[in-house]
Image: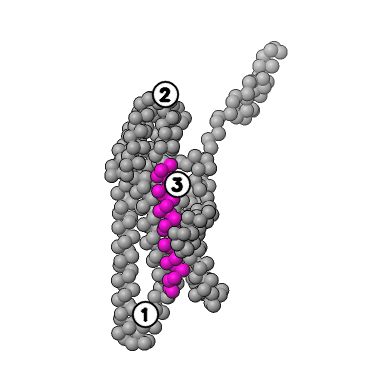
Amino acid sequence: MTSRFLKKIASGLRRSRPPDQDPPGTPAQPEPPHTARPARRGHSRHLMAWTAVSALAMLAAVFVVRQIHDFVRAGFASHSIYGWLSAGALTLLGVVVLAAVAWEVRGYLALAENSRLRAAFEGIELAPEDEANVTLATREMSAWLSRLGRRAEPGLGRAVAEVERRRPLAADPRAWRHDLETLVLGRLDKQARVIIQAEAIITGVSTALSPYAFLDAMISMWRNARMIRQVAAVYRIRPGAIGTLALLRRTIVSVVLADLSQEAVGLLAPGLIRTAGGMGQGAMNALMTIRLGLSAQRECRPLPFPPGAQPGMMRLMWSVVKGAVLKRRGPEAQTAP
């Protein structure tokens, strides 16, 4: 009788217990793994950067349209012939600059991408014994070296041949990276830095002498597109879609600042436009060109730079200034200690 009564009480307790609770004494069950939500911080950061760049570009476009309108109106105010000549000259200049930029973009897009080569060497760093990684790296590196060896100067051709000779003899595939850095990439990095320095000087001097902000924007757009194409041509490869979009964003920033810098100088210090203002504007545009060139070199390089190997922006700017001063003083200044 007593046992039957206790069984009824136990069955009532089981029915009154919520279904999501375990009876006393039951071992705790492990919680299901928490599924992490994908991080959206990187996407929001890129979206904010593109939004800011778009706003600056729209502001610069407003200034450009206003300047062109004032330039053409001043020509018509003087004489109708001068007005039509001004409008025709600006139209022709715009067509020529756009054609030059399109030509540089076409040459840039004709190059192969470097994403597969980078991915292959990243796989070797993680798993050097994996045959699939070794096979992929061998195929991608051989294809890149063959492109690099075509129409190369004798020194680079010999370096490429030496890398190809050492590759089958290397005991560890990670030694390929060391051979590429010391024999090939160091030489290519110097060529890319020479191009960046030359374009920085041309852009800085041209924008410093230009009397109109819309001419500064045109010069910056053309020379920056040319510099990116030349840097990519040095390495015979270009970055993928993400790297290309990053370079496009930095190019837009450089062009916008080239246009707005003269407006800012004109508003803050009108008397400095033809003297120190032009020099400061040219120096800033040269610095932005160097920044864009270093970004292009970092994106176009088939392998990431080793730690501390890429020169800093200010160091390269100092080399540009020193080279420009020595070139102006003449060959006797370059031989001086």
For label 3, the residue is 298
**Looking at the picture, how far across and down is residue 237, in whole percent?**
35, 45
Q: Nearer the viewer, residue 102 or 288?
A: 288
Q: Nearer the viewer, residue 43 or 123?
A: 123
Q: Which residue extends farthest left?
A: 151
Would you say residue 195 sits in the magenta stretch?
Answer: yes
* CB-based contact (under 8 Å), mark 1 and mark 3: no
For label 2, the residue is 171
Residue 72 - label: 1
Q: Residue at x 32, y 39 (%)?
A: 157
Q: Residue at x 37, y 29 (%)?
A: 166
Mark 1 or 3: the one toward you:
3
Residue 226 - label: none
**Looking at the picture, how far across and down is residue 153, in whole percent?**
32, 44
Q: Amino acid at mark 3?
A: Arg
Q: Residue at x 60, y 24 (%)?
A: 29
Q: Which residues are magenta?
A: 186-213
- Secondary structure beneath disc 3? helix
Q: Is residue 333 visible?
A: yes
Instruction: Please indicate whether residue 14 sits to the left or right of residue 199 in the image.
Output: right
Q: Is residue 150 above or below residue 22?
A: below
